[in-house]
Image (cartoon, rainbow, N blue to C red):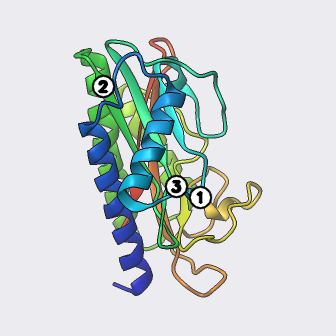
Amino acid sequence: MNSTVKSLIEAEKQAELLFKEIEKQEILVPGNSEEKINSLIFDLAFDMFGIKKYWHKRIVRCGENTLYPYNENPKNLTLKKDDILFLDFGPIFEEWEADFGRTYVVGKDPLKIKLSKDIEDAWHKGKAYYNSHKEITGAQLYYYCQNLANDYGWSFGGEIAGHIIGQYPHEKLEKENKSNYIHPQNHSNMNDLNAKGERKNWILEIHFVDKKKKIGGFFEQLMA
């Protein structure tokens, strides 16, 4: 394991600690708006790790906003009883990026609980599929994840299923350069070297939705 991977794994461990602490605090509670939850998490991350820098916009989405992919900016909603929400944060720990996403169910709605379990299970299947192929394109992994959504009875909600990650700032994620994304138009081998001659490190993200029920779930972390 090289030093880059070790640093990325350590950054992810710190992100995981942050998310575990979020669960312990009075943050993900009915009555709090997405903006308030976002602000409370920002303050908590600063108190725990001194973090002020994030490499992408901090996302908190609840209710029908869980249907929207990353690029959208829906109106601010308030968390309700028997609700669902997800968090997608990209904190930077000592110049190393993390990208961590989790879904939470408030209440005991069985369909929402199933969704939260399905996306985590699908993430591990996606990682196993990636690891089982020496040569695999971003398009192949994207379509595999899309088919997983169908297998579980959902639709795939993301325009991508992940992206590269590294030391801040990492190789620029230009929208027109699909080779940096797990995207249906990325036909290059994900294990090709980057511009610096190093192996790329990938984040896998699973976003399943049910448009009729107006709910979605999101699970994201490093594949390492």
Say what secondary structure mark 3 lies in: helix
Camera-nearest label, 3 or 1: 1
Contact between marks 3 and 1 (CB within 8 A): the answer is: no
Q: Give the residue at x 44% y 12%.
A: 213
How far is disc 3 from disc 1 in space, using C-alphas?
27 Å
Q: Give the residue at x 39% y 86%.
A: 2
Check the image and report above or below for 39 versus 96: above
Camera-nearest label, 2 or 1: 1
Say what secondary structure mark 1 lies in: loop
Kind of residue indicated by mark 3: Gln
How far is disc 3 from disc 2 in space, using C-alphas?
31 Å
Q: Residue lying at the far front in this picture: please name it.
A: 47
In the picture, the quarter occupied by the N terminus is bottom left
Camera-nearest label, 3 or 2: 2
Is the residue marked by circle 3 packed among few (<14), some (14-19), or many (20+) residues within 10 Å? many
Contact between marks 3 and 2 (CB within 8 A): the answer is: no
The foreground one among 40 and 78 is 40
Q: Position of residue 92 (x, y in %)?
A: 50, 63
N-terminal of the pair, mark 2 or mark 1, is 1
Q: Quadrant of residue 171?
A: bottom right
Query: In the rendered image, which residue does mark 1 sit on?
Result: 55
Kind of residue indicated by mark 1: Trp
Contact between marks 2 and 1 (CB within 8 A): the answer is: no
The foreground one among 35 and 68 is 35
Q: Position of residue 188 (x, y in %)?
A: 62, 67
Query: In the rendered image, which residue does mark 3 sit on?
Result: 140
Q: Give the residue at x 63% y 86%.
A: 196
Residue 105's disc is: 2
Q: Quadrant of residue 50?
A: bottom left
Residue 156's disc is: none
